């Protein structure tokens, strides 16, 4: 009887052990199933994200900025330089001065001046070719001289190319706008380039303080500047003249 009791106890212990092992196996199977489900959910989420990324990429490719960017302006100038090297200046200039040609893209176009300030190319208004830069209506004398000084400083470097930041009068409102141009030197002297409008948020000083679409008399300009909270900054940009003189000059 004692031996049977031992066998019975051993059998019970073995059964309990098997039950524990079976429970562990079931637990592992549950974890495996949960892991498989999680992997499946990840695969679905990844596929969804890939689909969204593909859709976004197609949407972005269809969008073109109303104004060109700095990289595009630089690329246009470098391509223009390659064209000059390939076909000569005269043939290239004919293409640059086609108002609706391939060298006029949104707000970007090729311009060029010789070392005397005579216009050699001006894609947006080819009729201005041959005129001196000081005759152009979209810049005061101070603006033109600032632009030329910076441009020829670039041409004095070994690379003879680079960015110029300057201001120009908007052709419609006659309000100063901030622009950047990438320029490269020409073999016969002078330079050509392409410009883009800079972010207005970076140029708060250039924000119009009034409607300047009509020329101001000196008295009107003086009154305007007396009431303007940017008068001191405005005058400081052109030390040789008063703020009133600057407003008058920029609107004629």
Image: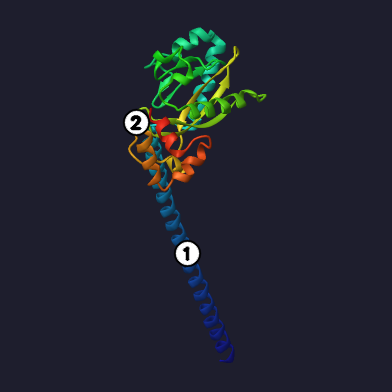
Quarter of the image containing the N terminus? bottom right
Residue toward you, 20 or 62: 62
Residue lying at 44% horizontally and 61% vertically, measured from the top left: 34
Residue lying at 55% horizontally and 17% vertically, measured from the top left: 81
Residue 152, located in which quarter of the rendered image? top right
Residue 106, located in which quarter of the rendered image? top left
Whole-percent x and y of residue 244?
42, 37
Residue lying at 48% horizontally and 12% vertically, measured from the top left: 93
Q: Is residue 131 left or right of residue 210?
A: right
On the image, numbered disc 1 is attached to which residue?
31
Q: Residues within 10 Å of mark 2 (few under 14, many from 20)?
A: some
Q: Residues within 10 Å of mark 1 (few under 14, many from 20)?
A: few
Residue 242 visible within the image: yes
Residue toward you, 124 or 6: 124
Q: How many numbered marks appear?
A: 2
Whole-percent x and y of residue 201?
44, 43
Residue toward you, 42 or 60: 60
Distance between mark 1 and mark 2 Cα atoms:
81 Å
Q: Is residue 103 left or right of residue 84?
A: left
Q: Is residue 8 left or right of residue 201?
A: right
Residue toward you, 65 or 93: 93
Element assignment for label 1: helix
On the image, numbered disc 2 is attached to which residue?
215
Colouring of the image: rainbow
């Amino acid at each position: 009887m004692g031996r049977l009791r031992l066998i019975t106890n051993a059998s019970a212990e073995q059964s309990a052990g098997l039950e524990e092992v079976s429970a562990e196996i079931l637990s592992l199977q549950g974890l495996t199933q949960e892991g498989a489900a999680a992997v499946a959910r990840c695969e679905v989420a990844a596929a969804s994200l890939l689909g969204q990324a593909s859709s976004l990429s197609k949407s972005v490719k269809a969008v073109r900025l109303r104004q060109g960017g700095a990289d595009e302006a630089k690329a246009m100038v470098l391509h223009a330089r390659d064209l000059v090297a390939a076909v000569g200046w005269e043939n290239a200039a004919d293409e640059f001065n086609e108002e609706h040609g391939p060298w006029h893209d949104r707000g970007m176009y090729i311009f060029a001046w010789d070392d005397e300030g005579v216009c050699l190319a001006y894609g947006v208004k080819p009729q201005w070719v041959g005129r001196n830069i000081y005759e152009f209506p979209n810049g005061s004398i101070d603006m033109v001289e600032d632009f030329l000084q910076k441009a020829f400083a670039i041409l004095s470097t070994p690379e003879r190319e680079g960015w110029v930041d300057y201001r120009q009068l908007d052709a419609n409102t006659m309000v100063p706008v901030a622009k950047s141009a990438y320029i490269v030197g020409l073999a016969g002297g002078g330079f050509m380039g392409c410009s883009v409008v800079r972010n207005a948020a970076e140029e708060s000083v250039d924000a119009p303080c009034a409607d300047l679409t009509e020329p101001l008399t000196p008295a009107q300009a003086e009154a305007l500047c007396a009431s303007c909270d940017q008068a001191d900054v405005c005058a400081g940009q052109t030390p040789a003249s008063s703020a009133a003189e600057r407003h008058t000059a920029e609107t004629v």
